[in-house]
Amino acid sequence: MNVHEHHRQEGHAPVDQAEPQAADALKDPVCGMVVTKQSPHRREHDGRPYYFCSAGCEARFADDPGRYLRPASPARPAAVAAPAAPASTLYTCPMHPEIRQDHPGNCPKCGMTLEPLLP
């Protein structure tokens, strides 16, 4: 059984598929599942309570809390600033070439960064 099969077996939904969250909904620090303060799987660490979706996630947390509490490393390095384009430059989306505007920004269809339209 992989790390999250127990969630599917117990009828839990991943965070991105969860129903709208109640005011007391929290995130399991091990797997990211939505849990509430009513969960029977609870552990305190450094004076703060943490709630879990299952005994398995609680046990993994107990073995190495720091692993689950460390801030995530950046997914990619910071972008290097591109040289300024001339004022007359048009910008377009690589995926939606019909999108054109006279200033940089994001595509309204897909959110990708607009790129200068090259001659």
Image: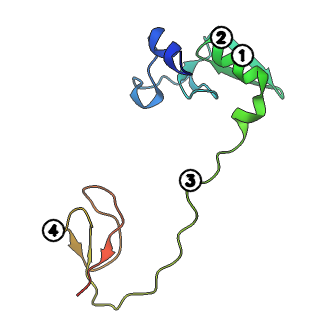
28 horizontally vs 92: left or right: right
- The answer to whether marks 3 and 4 mark residues whose Cβ atoms lie closer than 8 Å is no
The amino acid type of the residue labelled 2 equals: Ala
* Foreground residue among 113 and 63: 63
85 horizontally vs 76: left or right: left
Between discs 3 and 2, the one toward the N terminus = 2
Question: Picture coordinates of residue 52 (x, y %)?
Answer: 63, 18
Which residue in the protein does label 3 denote? 75
Residue found at x 62% / y 16%: 37
The amino acid type of the residue labelled 1 equals: Ala
Q: CA distance from mark 2 to mark 1?
A: 6 Å
Q: CA distance from mark 3 to mark 2?
A: 30 Å
- Which of discs 3 and 4 lies nearer the camera? The answer is 3
Between discs 1 and 4, the one toward the N terminus = 1
Question: Picture coordinates of residue 83 (x, y %)?
Answer: 46, 86
Q: CA distance from mark 4 to mark 2?
A: 52 Å
- The answer to whether marks 2 and 1 mark residues whose Cβ atoms lie closer than 8 Å is yes
Residue found at x 72% / y 23%: 61
Question: Picture coordinates of residue 2 (x, y %)?
Answer: 54, 20
Which residue in the protein does label 2 denote? 55
- Which of discs 1 and 4 lies nearer the camera? The answer is 1
Disc 4 crowd rating (10 Å Cα; few below 14, some 14-19, many 20+) is few
- Callout 3 secondary element: loop
Which residue in the protein does label 4 denote? 98
The amino acid type of the residue labelled 3 equals: Ala
103 horizontally vs 66: left or right: left
Residue 59 marker: 1
